[in-house]
Each structure stands twice: as C-alpha cells, then as structure tokens.
Image: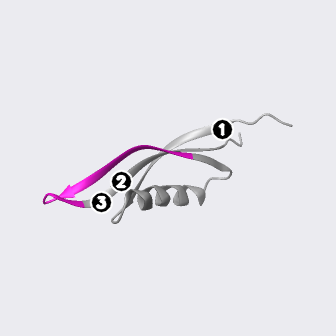
C-alpha cells in the first residue's frame, strides 16, 4: 500500500433555494476538474440580503482531494 497526500481547498457555492443546494453546487463544480475528491466539510453558511429578504444562500465548503504531485 502506498502513502497518499491530500490537499484542501475552500469554495463558496451559491443557490437561490437552500444552503444544501449551495454546498452541492460547490462540490459538483469542483468535481468536474478535480480527481479523487474525498471529503467536504461545511465551514460557514450565510445569506446575501436584498431589501431585507434572502436573495442568495451561500455555503463555504472545505473540500479535500488526493494530491497528484
């Protein structure tokens, strides 16, 4: 068995409907260009407001993937 190295990046996903959809959008977009994604953690949830109403849900996601140096 070989040793592995993993790298972490942070992404911000957005959605007009929910934090879950925002997090999912970040992971799915990253997976299009990264190989061997492993774990995603939610670091922060916030909302963009317009005129006192929620306009956008935002999820900051910490994502790990296998480093292919």
Q: Is residue 43 above or below residue 32?
A: above
Q: How many marks?
A: 3
- Residue under the point 70% across and 35% down: 5
Residue 58: numbered disc: 2
Q: Viewer-nearest of labels 1 and 2?
A: 2
The magenta-colored residue range is 40-54
Determine the residue located farthest toward the left in the rendered image: 51
> How many residues crowd mark 2 within 10 Å: few (<14), some (14–19), many (20+)?
many
Q: Please tell me whether residue 43 belongs to the stretch shown in magenta.
A: yes
Say whether residue 5 is magenta.
no
Is 60 left or right of 49, judged from the image as shown? right
In the rendered structure, are the residues bearing label 3 and label 2 in contact, judged by CB atoms less than 8 Å apart?
yes
Q: Residue at x 33, y 57 (%)?
A: 57
Query: Where is residue 52 shown, x and y percent of the image?
Result: 14, 57
> Which one is closest to the eye, mark 3 or mark 1?
3
- Give the alpha-carbon distance from disc 3 to disc 1, as whole Å: 31 Å
Q: Secondary structure at mark 2?
A: strand
């Amino acid at each position: 068995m070989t040793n592995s190295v993993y790298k972490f990046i942070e992404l911000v996903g957005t959605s007009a409907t929910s934090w879950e959809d925002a997090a999912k959008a970040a992971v799915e977009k990253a997976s299009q260009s990264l190989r061997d994604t492993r774990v995603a953690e939610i670091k922060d949830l916030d909302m963009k407001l317009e005129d006192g109403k929620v306009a956008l849900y935002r999820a900051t996601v910490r994502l790990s993937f296998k480093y292919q140096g």
